[in-house]
Amino acid sequence: MLGAGFGTVVPFPGGRPQVASGQVGFERAELARILDLYGRMVAAGEWRDYAMDFTRDFAVFSAFRRTADTPQMRVEKRPELRQRQGMWALFGEQGQVLKRGHELAGVLAPIERRLLKVVEG
């Protein structure tokens, strides 16, 4: 028999911050794909740090060569562009758009090809 207080959920002091309604994020499979590429680039010595940013309009994954640098690449997800040029975009170091598309795999392809060159060389 359970005593008093057992089975009662007590919230952690301060609680969890509420996630903004309508906030864009990465789905588990998308994040797994991005982090898999990130891990391989770290193993190749190309990247050392990453950052993620989530807003109402977009989600961004940025990869850095060194922590204090500007991002070497950014993958951005903008669902409002789903019906137009595609919700995925890959940006280079200077902010130039390297690739846009409807599928994450196609947008990550230039980085995947670069990884093959790094491993071969």
Image (tube, rainbow, N blue to C red):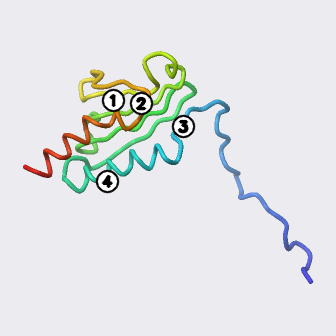
Q: Which residue is mark 2?
A: 76
- Indicate the position of residue 92 as horizontal and vertical percent values: 26, 28
- Indicate the position of residue 116 as horizontal and vertical percent values: 18, 46
> Which class describes the residues within 10 Å of circle 4: few (<14), some (14-19), or many (20+)?
some
Q: At label 2, which amino acid type do we have?
A: Glu
Quadrant for the N terminus in the image: bottom right
Q: Earlier in the sequence, mark 2 or mark 1?
A: 2
Helix or strand or loop: what does disc 3 sit on? loop
Q: Earlier in the sequence, mark 3 or mark 2?
A: 3
Q: Which residue is mark 3?
A: 25
Helix or strand or loop: what does disc 2 sit on? strand
What is the distance, in whole Å, between disc 3 and disc 4 at their CAs?
Answer: 20 Å
- Indicate the position of residue 43 as horizontal and vertical percent values: 23, 56
* Residue under the point 54% across and 37% down: 25
What is the distance, in whole Å, between disc 4 and disc 2 at their CAs?
Answer: 18 Å
Q: Earlier in the sequence, mark 4 or mark 2?
A: 4
Q: Which residue is mark 4?
A: 39
Q: Which residue is mark 1?
A: 90
User: 84 left or right of 24?
Assistant: left
What is the distance, in whole Å, between disc 1 and disc 4 at their CAs?
Answer: 18 Å
Label pair 1/4, CB-CB below 8 angstroms: no
